Amino acid sequence: MEILREFVYWIGIILCLPSAFLLLEVVAGMAIRPSHKANENAASEAALSPAGDAAPSAVLLIPAHNEQALLGEMLDRLKCVDRENLRTVVIADNCTDDTAKIAREAGVEVWERSHDSDRGKPYALAWALQRLEEQPPQVVVFMDADSWFQQGSPAELAREVIAHHRPVQAIYRMADAGLRGFAFRFRNEVRLRGLASLGAPVQLTGSGFAISWADLQKHPVPIGELAEDACWGWALAAAGIGPRLAAGVEVLSYLPSSKEGAQTQLRRWEHGILGATLRKLPMLLRSAFLPPRLSRIFHFADILVPPLALLVLLSFGFGLLGLLIGAGWLALPAFLALDFVASAVFLGWLWYGREDVPLSKLLMAPFYAVSKIGVYLSFLFKRQQGWQRTDRDDG
């Protein structure tokens, strides 16, 4: 029993580390959140000022697998943004619908790919990048077929890549309100703003990022990963060219409307991130500490923050176990970790989410965490291995 008590106590201490860093990220991100007024002023100044330096040559790559439902809308929105020196290519990957036809009718270049076994976004991107070797651009911008530029443009991302000699990531979030939309925004905006404020590389979040052609030659697409964007960002950071946040560019998408589609997307994300973190932990440790650099240590600490629902479940579970097998001192570290997480989420909601998510819905977050228990159990006993498309239709 004494060994179990020690185990519960020290697990609680360990859980405090990522929880405390999460709170640090949120507080740091609050310091650089732009106000609506600041956004309006910046937009006015941009409209009145003369055009800046010419945009570098860039290719916007849009991998699409049976995306006829949203692709047309996205390409229509793309016509309204700055596309200077931009070549747009839709990769119709193993499509059985009208994806290629819709893209051609929108006036963009279409590359059709078909392969019996190599399916999924990483394979499609690797294939397209190989084709680009015949006439390479200076920068490649990556965007999902179900997302669009709400603010800024691919040309702006390309300019930032050349200006800073590093990959860049736009703010990528969901247009949907509600708890799921806020959870996505918390991960992809609140925490990324915090990392940027701390001077650390940010994570690549799947859509709305850009990498120079020279860096792509040294760091190709991670094939076979469910979370290829995250792994790609980690490799770039390990090489000393970690992505920076392009806070003035915002890319939006829609969450899957069907329950099955939401579960498929969630399982792929969570299993992909957890599996990749476990496999690449030695590389990540070397990157952060050999030699030790504060910015890379912050980046490493962010990677080690588990999915928030899992962190909540672990903290509450070990805190409750501590109460059951001993006294309050056993449960104190785990409940302190839970308090850090709750404080971080509340501050993030207060600063970014209260316009879209009422407090009554935020208070339902613990039940949202409980609903994900099956996802984590399946990671242990029936882990997703291959890529599976997210179904975004109601039917």
Image (spheres, helix red, strand yellow):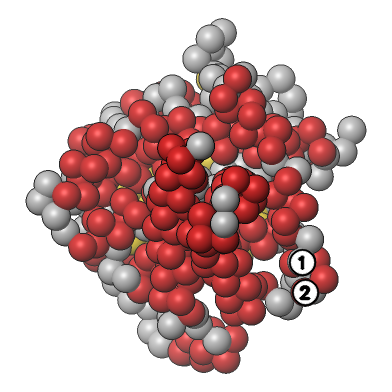
From the image, tell me which residue sits under label 2: 359
- Asked if disc 1 and disc 2 are in contact, CB closer than 8 Å, the reply is yes
Q: Position of residue 155 (x, y in %)?
A: 42, 60
Q: Position of residue 270 (x, y in %)?
A: 57, 38
Q: Is residue 75 left or right of residue 25?
A: right
**Looking at the rendering, which quadrant does residue 98 occupy?**
top right
Work out whether residue 255 or residue 152 is closer to the camera in this orientation and state it. Answer: 255
For label 1, the crowd category at 10 Å Cα-Cα, with few meaning under 14, some 14 to 19 and many 20 or more, is few
Q: Position of residue 336 (x, y in %)?
A: 52, 64
Residue situated furthest right in the rendering = 395
Residue situated furthest left in the rendering = 291
Residue drawn at (51%, 60%), measured in percent from left and top? 329
Residue drawn at (57%, 91%), measured in percent from left and top? 37
* The label number, if any, that marks residue 3 in the structure image: none
Residue drawn at (32%, 71%), measured in percent from left and top? 198
Q: Can residue 271 be seen in this snapshot?
A: yes
For label 2, the crowd category at 10 Å Cα-Cα, with few meaning under 14, some 14 to 19 and many 20 or more, is some
Q: Is residue 356 left or right of residue 63?
A: right
User: What amino acid is labelled 1 in the image?
Assistant: Leu
From the image, tell me which residue sits under label 1: 363
